[in-house]
Amino acid sequence: MNLPKRVAFTEVGARDGLQNISQFIPTEKKIALINALSEAGVPYMEVASFVHPKLVPQMADAAEVVTGIKRLPGTKYLALVPNTKGAQRAVEYGLDGWGVFVSSTETHNQRNVNASIAETIQGFAEVVRMAREAKVPVYCAISMSFGCPYEGDVPPERVVSITGKLLDIGIERIVLGDTTGMGNPHQVEDLTGRLLALYPAMSLSLHFHDTRGAGLANVLAGLQAGATWFEGSVAGLGGCPFAHGATGNTTSEDMVHMLHEMGIETGIDLDKLLATARLAQE
Ligand code: MG
């Protein structure tokens, strides 16, 4: 196997993970979790979402969290900034990256943000302009990249086409999200290979779910196809919004363990990450 010596890693537990927990987690507990992840050396971390608190009540304290955490130089702190209102708030907090999101299927995108895929991408242009002004890079997650509970199979050509449009408007990194864990290693290898062949200079991250237990197998398939950036959630925080009780995001400590055992560096201290996983479980 021709595998990278090192990969980048984004920890999404404090945002994607907590967002799927209906019980409100007190601000100081969120801050303690984020600080512990920073101490573990996580290189990239989503820490908040600047969305309307009515839509995502768990993220209502985004400003308090972002100002309350201790930022370490080894970690880049990211937040979801899906529209210009969110961007206006995010500008104040000096984040290291802004995330936006679109779905690969019209049905899920309509249900999620009440707009077509084209309208959603158009809406990003202004966020990208504001990010340029603030000198912050913008990444975009394409959810349902490997299958959709509403539409079933997602043709890889469609994800390739959406990626092209996002790169055209100045999005700096694309995250392929397997939002409901429908992806299999063959698909991952195929789509990752297509994208990197077409856009060799692009920055690409892979975000898997363990809904059907395929998370780590998909990581390996991504590695084999040339991917060098993965996302995970500490303690597997966050379930699946479409299947109550199902496992969600691929667990960070499992992924980091596998990568390290394979001789692939992440820069993360696994012992500290495991201690943080116990904190997260509490
Ligand atoms: Mg997720």
Image: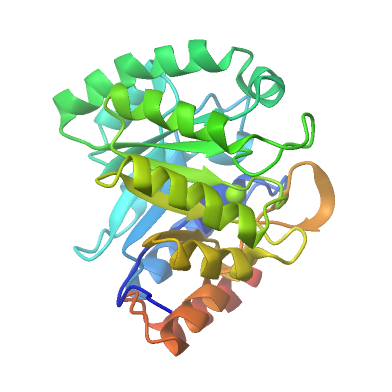
Please state, as top left, top right, bottom left or bottom right, where the C terminus lies in the image: bottom right
Q: In the rendered picture of this protein, how many numbered marks are placed on residues?
A: 0
Q: Residue at x 30, y 77 (%)?
A: 5
Position of 152 relative to 6 (above/below)? above
Is 106 left or right of 135, judged from the image as shown?
A: right
Q: Is residue 78 visible?
A: no
Residue sitting at x 59%, y 63%: 218
Looking at the image, residue 45 sits to the left or right of residue 19; the answer is left
Q: Residue at x 22, y 66 (%)?
A: 74
Colour mode of the rendering = rainbow
Image quarter of the N terminus: bottom left
Q: Left or right: where does residue 25 sit relative to residue 15?
A: right
Residue 54 on image: x %, y %: 62, 24
69 is higher (above) or lower (below) than 35? above
Residues 238 and 179: in front is 179
- Visible in this render: residue 87? yes
At horizontal 15% and vertical 33% (from top left) the residue drawn is 135
Tell me residue 167's x, y (percent): 32, 30
Which is more toward the observer, 25 or 173?
173
Q: Residue furthest right?
A: 244
- Say which quarter of the image contains residue 134: top left
- 67 horizontally vs 185: left or right: left
